[in-house]
Amino acid sequence: MTKQNIAAFFDIDGTLYRDSLMTEHFKKLIKYEVLDEKIWIDEIRELYIKWDNRAGDYDNYLFELSESYVRAITNLDKKTLDFVADQVMKLTADRVYKFTRNIIKFHKDQGHLVFFISGSPDYLVERMGKKHGAFLSVGSGYIMKDDKFTGKVIPMWDSESKNKMIDELVATYNINLDNSFAYGDTHGDYRMLNRVGNPVAINPSNELLNDIKENEELSKRAKIIIERKDVIYQLDSSVNIIKEN
């Protein structure tokens, strides 16, 4: 009988990277005057400030950001997008969580297959995967034609898309999910976490934490990692959520 592989599936934004790769790419397209700053001011700034001040929903912020981002870069040429993506990697790719960076190294040292599965654009995810030595990296597919972005996207940010991708990876690489690991931070990672024997939620959103708590079997397996400043906390899923008045 062929030996099955152990995999470690990682989300990137908020799980490895301490922000959103798409946000950084968007900002640098403006910085290099590829895009007009008015786009950010009119469409994104208010949502970003609300989220940054912890007065807005993170998932809602990312959804609105992605809609605006897609509109803004439609018809931009691939060469420009790639140049700015390289600048993102050069200037900000080391802004990662210490826990996640170390656990990626652990899995690689153990011979596990490390997969990055992220909703960020594929050209950013692939670069991040190369930097951190992932076995394979899969992002949202930004469709190009004649070396220009068409405005069409094959999403990888939602729970269903990530679940289907795991099905493909399991079939292709003969993966034993019961012995495998997954790391995520938002509702879009829920089904990915639920598929494996060793799920880890890193700085989870309120929605993801509730998802875990409501799933009795998952809550027994799941670990909660909180990284703040230079301290890493490990909790179980019984942690209480303090509601605002």
Image (cartoon, rainbow, N blue to C red):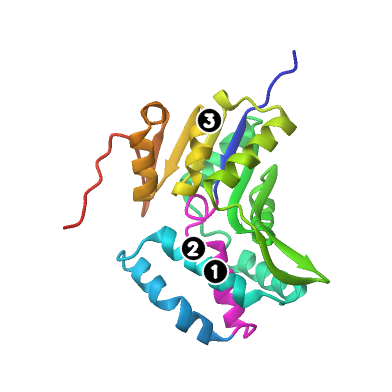
Does the image show residue 185? Answer: no
Which residue is farthest right?
Answer: 146
Which residue is farthest left?
Answer: 245
Mark 1 Cα-neighbour bin, 10 Å: few <14, some 14–19, many ≥20: few
Q: In the rendered image, which residue does mark 3 sit on?
A: 196
* Quarter of the figure with residue 216: top left
Q: What is the three-letter code of the residue carrying label 1?
A: Glu
CA separation in Å, label 2 and label 1: 6 Å
Observer-nearest of 58 and 88: 58
The percent position of residue 194, horizontal first and vertical second, equals 48, 33
Q: In the rendered image, which residue does mark 1 sit on?
A: 67
Mark 2 Cα-neighbour bin, 10 Å: few <14, some 14–19, many ≥20: few
Q: Nearer the viewer, mark 2 or mark 3?
A: 2
* Quarter of the figure with residue 143: bottom right
Q: Earlier in the sequence, mark 3 or mark 1?
A: 1
Observer-nearest of 185 and 158: 158
Q: Earlier in the sequence, mark 2 or mark 3?
A: 2
The percent position of residue 25, horizontal first and vertical second, equals 59, 70
Q: In the rendered image, which residue does mark 2 sit on?
A: 63
Residue 236 lies left or right of residue 133; in this view the side is left
CA separation in Å, label 3 and label 1: 31 Å
Helix, strand or loop status at disc 2: helix
Q: In this picture, is 13 found above or below 180?
A: below
Range of residues picked out in magenta: 12-35
Q: In this picture, is 87 found above or below 13?
A: below
Tally the marks: 3
In the rendered image, residue 172 lying in the magenta stretch gets the answer: no
Observer-nearest of 140 and 152: 152
Q: Are marks 2 and 3 in contact (CB under 8 Å)?
A: no
